[in-house]
Image (cartoon, rainbow, N blue to C red):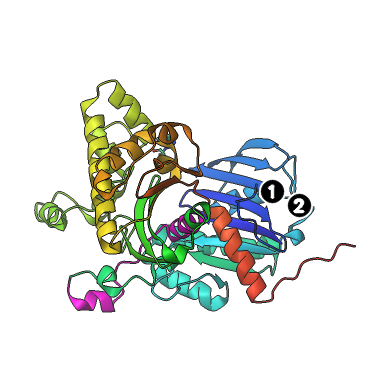
Amino acid sequence: MKVLVLNSGSSSQKSSLYEIGETVADDPPAFLWEGKIEWHGDIAEAEVKNSRGTVQRSSVQVLSRAEAVEHLLSTLWQDKTRAVASAAEIDVVGHRVVHGGPNYDAPVLVTPEVKAEIAKAAHFAPLHNRAELDGMELVEKLLGPVPQVAVFDTAFHRKMPQAATVYPGPYRWFESGIHRYGFHGVSHQYCAARAAQLLRRDLDSLKVVTCHLGNGCSLAAIHESHSIDTTMGFTPLEGLMMGTRSGSIDPGILTYLIRQGHLRPQEMDDVLNQESGLLGISGISGDMREILASMKQGHARAKLAFDIYVHRLRAAIGAMVAGLGGMDALVFTAGVGENSAEVRDAVCQKLDFLGLKLNATANVQRAPDADIAASDSAVRVLTIRAQEEWAIARECWHLMRRSLRWTPRIPA
Ligand code: AMP
């Protein structure tokens, strides 16, 4: 089965093509084709790779998102990077959908009704959900009536208990959809399953805390294969300090700033989402690599940004462990989680009261996917490469098999 995955951002589009046979491999396979396009104004920059090692970079003028994405997808069946003879070879297209609203707890085949629900949830996540709907329409135009699957980032958290879901404001908030949805679910779910596989344990028997630390950051507490708590909430702004997002702050700051007439809603949105976090404190960058480099040169505010990041991360891990009543495995994933030995070391140092001990050499040297805990650690510590596109492809395969929408092609 050839599965095309679309991961739409507000001004970027990532996409991958995988081939899955009769069974799904345990280890993530190599992609057949992978591409990314980013646009600023009317110029889009694309980078595309295929499994033969061909890499092609291009810069094109575009008038819309649709034109940019069309350019990216055309390299699947054209040019040096071509990975299929024609669009008709693609069996299914999976979409990462950031907000599934209150109803979806699993991937679904895209139908007009599903699109209407995604459009309804768009008022919670306007930039993302609209981009994803655009992607579905473009696939219909370019690939015709191919089955499409929506895989929701909120779905994995839908079984969280109400105590973790409902905000302690007036109950009518909850009734009108203002509650904790959680995000990065595709990544948390994949990491928990992968951790169980690497540890040769049944996920149902494990208590796992997954730390997705990328540009956006969130934790999930996983018990009996379900998310029972997470740090992001109604929006992806709650919880941990992030690259340019503040994470949780006292809501009284906002009402204070409104009363003082300092900030209007759009400005507040910009400050909290784009001018806070590592960037806001350091004044240098939201990229952890630059924070670490500046710290080494003695930059005091870069050091403060790092310290706040670690302090809040450690505190949030503590809260997840308390909710779980223990922890068998702590997983680090995404850009910072996979790559920053400094962050992992600083966070884990004070978790020794749980019997957690890092293997200092493995922490620095071993690339994901790896167990970097000391052999006598009471908690396993794992680095796992984020594989959201592969996780979505796998969900598509399962759904197609279950719904009998696909049988293997018999070789001629
Ligand atoms: P992601 O959203 O998973 O692509 O993560 C992107 C972020 O990962 C970047 O903004 C960096 O802050 C961080 N990152 C990537 N590589 C490294 C590294 N080698 N060390 C520390 N942070 C890194």
Q: Position of residue 232 (x, y in %)?
A: 32, 58
Q: Is residue 109 above or below residue 315?
A: below
Q: Where on the picture, by quarter, is residue 80? A: top right
Which of the two marks, 1 or 2, is nearer to us in this view? Answer: 1
Q: Is residue 29 left or right of residue 156?
A: right
Determine whether label 1 and label 2 are within 8 Å by CB: yes
Which residue is located at x 54 percent, y 52 percent? 65
Q: Nearer the viewer, residue 114 or 359?
A: 359
Q: Is residue 267 above or below residue 203?
A: above
Which residue is located at x 44 percent, y 35 percent? 362
Direction top: furthest residue: 297
Q: Nearer the viewer, residue 411 or 222?
A: 222
Which residue is located at x 69 percent, y 46 percent? 75
Q: Nearer the viewer, residue 173 or 27?
A: 27
Instruction: Give the quarter of the figure containing the C terminus.
Output: bottom right
Q: Is residue 138 left or right of residue 273?
A: right
Q: Is residue 366 in the magenta section? A: no
Q: Where on the picture, by quarter, is residue 182? A: bottom left
Label 2 neighbour load within 10 Å: few <14, some 14-19, many 20+: some
Residue 84 bears which disc, if any? 2
Instruction: Report the span colored magenta.
Output: 169-194
Q: Position of residue 171 (x, y in %)?
A: 20, 77
Question: Dot 1: what SS?
Answer: loop
Q: Position of residue 372 (x, y in %)?
A: 43, 41
Task: Identify residue for label 1.
Answer: 32
Q: Can residue 311 be spotted in the picture?
A: yes
Amino acid at dot 1: Leu
Residue 186 bears which disc, if any? none
Direction right: furthest residue: 412
Label 1 neighbour load within 10 Å: few <14, some 14-19, many 20+: many
Amino acid at dot 2: Val
* Quadrant of the rendered image holding ligand 1: top left
